[in-house]
Amino acid sequence: MKTDDEIKRDVEAELRWDPDIDAKDIAVSAKGGVVTLTGFIPSYLQKFEAEHDVKRVQGVVGVANDLEVRLPGIDQRPDPDIARDAVEAMKMQMPYSHQNFKVIVRDGWITLEGETEWNYQKEKAEMSVRGVKGAKGVINSITVKPKVAAQEIKRQIEAAFLRSAEVDAKKIQVDATDGEVVLKGTVHSWFEREQAERAAWQAPGVKRVEDRLVIQP
């Protein structure tokens, strides 16, 4: 098992390795396998990518992303311009469902509102606006309204686990009630835990996932 110093060193190396991140102002600390990122990052998309990089490192069991987005002067834009680009980005990525969502921008922060039956649409809406120039962050307030019975949600998630080459389905228990899913059991890595949670979120009608999976390398 890795020590915290080894995890810290590997995370720093992973961030430096990523050509899409300016990591010079990022400070990394690790305690009990939980990594904390502090400092500054020049865009919201880079903040998200930095967190994704950390989760790939073996031995990481949690991430606290406290990075502050500090936009370069050239990237600072008025809220109406950010809102227009965010709407256009959603139209491009979600041509058949973008009309279900509303974009609100205040002080560079994008808030998404609306309703959907599918969590993947909620995630896709957020993903489509992360790279909008001038955005400091995204608040995803889109709600998921389930129309699927709990047993069907449970069945579909278990089937997804069995199909996945990245998840050991035999060690994961799925409970579903009224659109809320609880995952219990063990996984071998943070990556496997994340993949299991992602698979659960992709089932129709899921509005909340409580991940109780324990990492046992």
Image (cartoon, helix red, strand yellow):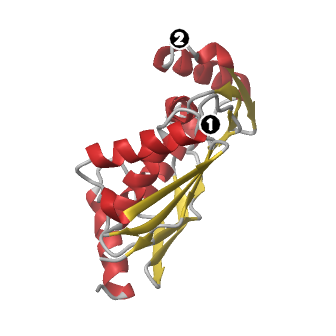
Is residue 166 depicted above or below 84 in this figure? below
What residue lies at 63% left-to-right and 42% top-to-bottom?
A: 179
What residue lies at 49% left-to-right and 45% top-to-bottom?
A: 154
Q: Nearer the viewer, residue 81 or 50?
A: 50
Is residue 195 depicted above or below 55 in this figure? above
Say what secondary structure mark 2 lies in.
loop
Disc 2 marks a residue whose amino acid type is Tyr
The residue where tag 2 is placed is: 96
Side of 7 where 211 appears, left or right: right
> Which label was assigned to residue 76?
1
Please identify the quadrant where the N terminus is shown.
bottom left
Please identify the quadrant where the C terminus is shown.
bottom left
What residue lies at 35% left-to-right and 77% top-to-bottom?
A: 216
What residue lies at 48% left-to-right and 65% top-to-bottom?
A: 184
Query: Seen from this angle, which residue lies furthest front?
Result: 151
First of labels 2, 1 by sequence position = 1
Say what secondary structure mark 1 lies in.
loop
- Residue 41 at what x, y percent from top left? 51, 55
